[in-house]
Amino acid sequence: MIVNADSAQVYADLQILSARPTEEEMDGIEHRLFGAWDGAEPCSAAAWAARAKAEIADIHAAGAVPILVGGTGLYFKVLLEGIAPIPAIDPAVRAAVRAMDEADAYKLLQIEDPERAAMLDPGDRQRIARALEVKRSTGVTLGDWQMAKAGGIAEEVTLHPLIVEPERQWVYDRCDARFAAMLDSGAIAEVEALLERGLDPDLPVMRAIGVPEIAAWLAGEIEAEEVVAAGSQATRNYAKRQFTWFRRQPPAGWPRARPDWESENIDIEAHFASLLRK
């Protein structure tokens, strides 16, 4: 059984823009936690991990094997290692940090938490803001809080991980083709439906790749050709952050597959088959 670990595919509102599997692509195999959250409810890593734990336990009880798939590394990290008991952030601190210019926030983080800043891409606005607001609100760095993590399942399960690392330019080319294809497949109508709900623009579903870009075009703020350029660039930026995260964060012993889908040198299906045989 497949369990979703992608932070966009959890939202029912994002079928197309998240590239959530269709019924045809699921091919009769049970998929869980896809479209499981309404866009009005933010899905945090902790909330996802709690649901994922329950799904994994249920799948094990049925004598089946849960296969977690997705590109949201933080989800995996929280599920396996647990979560830090960070107190609620002072609203005034959060508002001040979130209002900062991206470059200024990163420079301040380099001063106030240089270790965390070195781990982050300068364009990763969300994680930079999170680290800075934690340090300013609690006086303790995010790294120190994470030393007190609890609730992970890493010691309770037998894990067979695989990190898929295709060639970077191949991924970037796919990012460009992907966004254009989404526009042709109903992404605009998907964003229109979201806007009609009048949701808070700060909700994760409203900040998902493609939503701000298409919303700006619908509002007459940018031209049609700019939508494709902006959406494709946002997708490539996200892919770059994923490359960085999965290079630095997972345990050193996790196996990596570097397939080249334009050749037959590496059979990615064979990698997954080997995991299931373990």
Image (cartoon, rainbow, N blue to C red):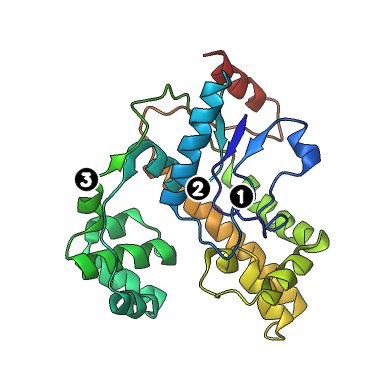
Q: Which mark is residue 36?
A: 1
Residue located farthest toward the left when viewing the structure as drawn: 139
Q: Nearer the viewer, residue 161 or 75?
A: 75
Residue at screen point 54% across, 38% down: 165
Determine the image quadrant of residue 3.
top right
Residue at screen point 22% across, 52% down: 145
Q: Amino acid at mark 3?
A: Ala
Q: 33 above or below 236? A: above
Q: 44 above or below 138? A: above
The Cα–Cα distance between marks 1 and 3, rounded to whole angstroms, is 29 Å
Q: Residues within 10 Å of mark 1 (few under 14, many from 20)?
A: some
Nearest to N terminus: mark 2 or mark 3 = 2
Residue 227 position, x and y percent, is 70, 72
The Cα–Cα distance between marks 2 and 3, rounded to whole angstroms, is 22 Å
Q: Secondary structure at mark 3?
A: loop
Q: Nearer the viewer, residue 116 or 38?
A: 38
Instruction: Choose mark 1 or mark 2, whichever is in front.
Output: 1
Q: Amino acid at mark 2?
A: Thr
Q: Which mark is residue 148?
A: 3
Q: Amino acid at mark 1?
A: Ala
Instruction: Choose mark 2 or mark 3, whichever is in front.
Output: 3
The Cα–Cα distance between marks 1 and 2, rounded to whole angstroms, is 16 Å
Q: Which residue is mark 2?
A: 72
